[in-house]
Amino acid sequence: MAVMKIIKDTDDILRKKSRPVEQINQRILTLLDDMADTLHKANGCGLAAVQVGILRRVVIVEVEKGKIIELINPEIIASEGQQNEVEGCLSIPDRWGITDRPMKVTVKALDREGKEFKVTGSGLAARAFCHEIDHLDGKLFTDNAIRMLTKEELEEME
Ligand code: NI
């Protein structure tokens, strides 16, 4: 297991589309483990493989401490409601914005054994699923933020 370097939004790789995983081999399993270490070190709630420089459709989400959800080739298959909450990104340090996201989403993905599963999340989990899956298509939360927080608002958050 290893902590990887998180790529910042000055790097164009974050704008690239990630390719589906065709075979879940040792490299993908190691990537998942390294991403978990990297996420814990950064104290975030989600990470996409592209953020550590790997253009593959692999995402991890951890909104509940100790419960990492690994998503390989994830797809949002249902969404409902709406939420406008504060969102940030490990690749865009110190910037936060209000985004427009569904309140609840259901994601279909493969687990590390290659088995298909579905997971439904609402609130923060829904935001995290949407945010990380957007990364796989080269999208950043700043693209669809309704507005970014001001310096004063950021100070209040601290
Ligand atoms: Ni992000």
Image: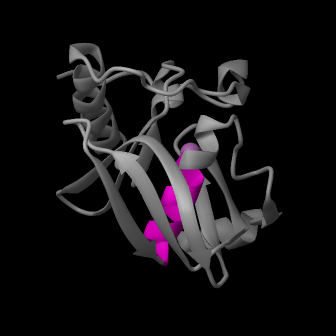
The vertical placement of 104 against 113, above or below, is: below
Which quadrant of the rendered structure holds the N terminus? top left
Residue closest to the eye, 69 or 154: 69
Left or right: 143 in relation to 53: right
Q: Which x, y percent locates residue 106?
A: 47, 67
- The answer, for residue 6, to whether it is visible in the render is no
**Colour treatment of the image:** one colour
The vertical placement of 57 against 62, above or below, is: above
> Image quadrant of residue 17?
top right
Residue closest to the eye, 157 or 68: 68
> Image quadrant of residue 47?
top left
Q: Which x, y percent locates residue 124?
A: 47, 71
Residue furthest out toward the bottom? 81
Rendered-image quarter of ligand 1: top right
Q: Main secondary structure of the magenta part?
A: helix
> Image quadrant of residue 136?
top right
* Rendered residue at 43%/25% (across/down): 21
Q: Which x, y percent locates residue 35?
A: 32, 32
* Rendered residue at 51%/18% (across/down): 53
Left or right: 102 in relation to 114: right
Q: Which x, y percent locates residue 58?
A: 42, 34
- The answer, for residue 41, to whether it is visible in the render is yes
Specify start and end residues of the magenta stretch as a single range.
123-132
Left or right: 23 in relation to 103: left
The vertical placement of 133 against 150, above or below, is: above
Residue closest to the eye, 41 or 26: 26
* Rendered residue at 25%/52% (across/down): 68
In reply to whether residue 81 is colored magenta, the answer given is no
Residue closest to the eye, 155 or 115: 115
